[in-house]
Image: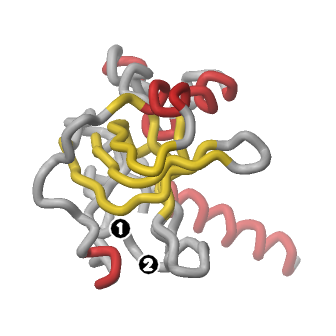
Amino acid sequence: MRLSFVLFVSSLLVVAACGGNAPKAPPAVVPAAPALAKLALAQKPAGAVAVVDAKKAGPADACVVSGRVANLVPGFAVLTLMDTSLPYCSEKNKEDGCKTPWDYCCESADTRTANSLLVEVRDANGKPIAGSLGDLRLLDAVTVAGKLTKDEHGNHVMLATGWFRDARPELPADLRWPQ
């Protein structure tokens, strides 16, 4: 009896949580940590290259890369930048109904890997800084300045010294931003 009641209440909570037709709302903006807020640039850095081109060129002490935010790591100054030549889901076909276009789920894992770049802001000890990147949001077009590195596993990592938000896309009215 108790198990049936618990299952019934749980199913009601799941249905209520799914909400169906909740209005589109941007995620709440957590102010950038003071150490990170100063990295938001007032002007777009010159000489930006695409993610794929930066990775092809290899490590560089000074590099400027443009792309789209495909992932933000909660609580840390870490994001994934996707090459803008790779359209996000629903970008070309608004009717395809993708509810999570920022994850590029319409592309293969190999394509996502080839077109993405990890971006981190690190402290003096080389650890990612804890904190919010402020008003950066998934799918924002950004230009990042910093140092491009390659780790022992062959992964490229951009150590950001600053970024500029170039644009924010318009998305379908029924899309719900992740919270």
Contact, mark 1 vs mark 2 (Cβ under 8 Å)? yes
Total number of numbered discs in the rendering = 2
Q: Where 153 falls versus 76 (above or below)?
A: above
Q: CA distance from mark 1 to mark 2?
A: 7 Å
Give the colour scheme shown.
secondary structure
In the image, which disc is placed on residue 145?
none
Q: Report the amino acid beneath label 1.
A: Leu
Give the image location of residue 128, x and y in percent. 55, 71
Badge 2, how many Cα within 10 Å: few under 14, some, many 20+? many
Give the image location of residue 53, x and y in percent. 45, 25
Q: 69 or 24, which is in the foreground? A: 69
Give the image location of residue 55, x and y in percent. 54, 32
Specify whether residue 16 is in view.
no
Quarter of the rendering occupied by the C terminus = bottom left
Question: Which residue in the rendered view is the most extreme toward the front?
Answer: 61
Quadrant for residue 133, please give it.
bottom left
Which element carries disc 2, helix, strand or loop? loop
Question: Which residue in the rendered view is the most extreme toward the top?
Answer: 93
In the image, which disc is placed on residue 131?
2
In the displayed structure image, the side of residue 80 where residue 37 appears, left or right? left
